[in-house]
Amino acid sequence: MLVFDLVTVKLGLRPAEPLPRRQDARNAFELMRERRSCRAFQARDLRPEDRAELMDAVRAQSQPERRLGQRPIRFEYVSAPLTVWPVVGAHEFLVAIAPLEYDRFAVIDVGRCLQKVVLQATRMGLASCWIGPGADHLSIERHLGARFDPARDHIVCVCALGYASRFIPLSVRVMSFAMRRRLPLEALVFADPRFEAPLDLAAPPFDRFGRCFEACRWAPSSYNGQTTRAVAVAQGAAETDAIRLDFYATTHSRYYAPVALGIWCANWETGCAALGIPGHFAVLSPEARDAQAAPELPRYDLSWLEDGD
Ligand SMILES: Cc1cc2nc3c(=O)[nH]c(=O)nc-3n(C[C@H](O)[C@H](O)[C@H](O)COP(=O)(O)O)c2cc1C
């Protein structure tokens, strides 16, 4: 296997691989469930039409009205063999940039907006991998050149995009497999702000949200840390009443936990949109959430509120 990996990956001696098929027939839930981190890419560049469609999605997700926070974020396209670990063959990237001055909502926006680009890429049949700790920031800054201002910009993470290769080194295959498991929903979604009672997903009014909770469960996170939790609250006593979902992070991490939380938000609202359930995000006070005596961690960030009639 080592010799095979050396020949196919290091020396690049391998047959040309087919282009993947588009996944337009898949629904939003299938796309969110089937997306996975790709750690071996084909050597070919994105076709111009794929790159153009991808950049359309980037432009759409970079609009100010798409953000939850006040601070600008952006995604720069880089075509270069950046130093990234342990991904092989990646040579096209989106670099997520937030203001140098720390702003938690800008970081959440990176997760939320970039995940929507990733979902569009998945629909196009492209492979993707979020890369945070495995990215060499100096090499990224060098390739960004004048597009990066060290006095104002902070690189949050990058996302490799391209066509998946079947030639995956054994070590990468083992690592990817080991990092795919997810906690059960009972450990992720709760019915109370003290995180004691798992939510009964089959009980009304939460049963209306079907696979939305599952979509959040399969959201990616750095080192598969799964640092996001949610508390679901019925807004009234009737079974048809609107619900609210409060999003929390389980660690003090300033970057990867809020990115993961933003990704949860993206999957949640993508699922709700697919079911035709409208809602919006807001930040609520502890009193409004009935969480005055809540522990320091998990830490509350924001809520999704279902819009009433
Ligand atoms: C913010 C963020 C940073 C990540 N950084 C890396 C990384 O540096 N290297 C890597 O191989 N995977 C990275 N990942 C991918 C995770 O390891 C992966 O999402 C997780 O193991 C779950 O697997 P899945 O994406 O295949 O569902 C990152 C994911 C996120 C969301």
Image (spheres, rainbow, N blue to C red):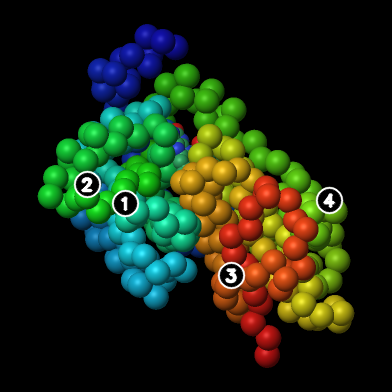
CA–CA distance in space, label 3 to label 4: 22 Å
CA–CA distance in space, label 2 to label 4: 44 Å
Horizontal side of 297 relative to 256 (left or right) equals: right
User: Would you say the residues marked 1 and 2 are in contact, meaning their CB atoms lie under 8 Å apart?
Assistant: yes
Q: Nearer the viewer, residue 308 or 106?
A: 106
Residue at left offset 78%, top offset 52%: 195
Nearest to N terminus: mark 1 or mark 2? 1
Q: Which residue has dot 2 on it?
A: 150
CA–CA distance in space, label 3 to label 2: 31 Å
User: Would you say the residues marked 3 and 4 are in contact, meaning their CB atoms lie under 8 Å apart?
Assistant: no
Which amino acid is tagged 4?
Answer: Glu
Indicate the secondary structure of the residue bearing disc 1: loop
For label 3, count other residues whose C-alpha is less than 10 Å away and answer few (under 14), some (14-19) or many (20+). some
Which amino acid is tagged 1?
Answer: Leu
| Residue 275 rendering spot, x and y as whole percentages | 63, 73
Residue at left offset 31%, top offset 51%: 100
| Residue 208 rendering spot, x and y as whole percentages | 75, 71
CA–CA distance in space, label 1 to label 3: 23 Å
Residue at left offset 62%, top offset 67%: 303
Indicate the secondary structure of the residue bearing disc 4: loop
Q: Which mark is residue 196?
A: 4
Horizontal side of 238 relative to 2 (left or right) equals: right
Is residue 260 in view from this perspective?
yes
Nearest to N terminus: mark 3 or mark 4? 4
For label 4, count other residues whose C-alpha is less than 10 Å away and answer few (under 14), some (14-19) or many (20+). few
Q: Quadrant of residue 128?
A: top left
Q: Which residue has dot 1 on it?
A: 100
User: Would you say the residues marked 1 and 3 are in contact, meaning their CB atoms lie under 8 Å apart?
Assistant: no
CA–CA distance in space, label 1 to label 2: 8 Å
Which amino acid is tagged 2?
Answer: Pro
Q: Which residue has dot 3 on it?
A: 283
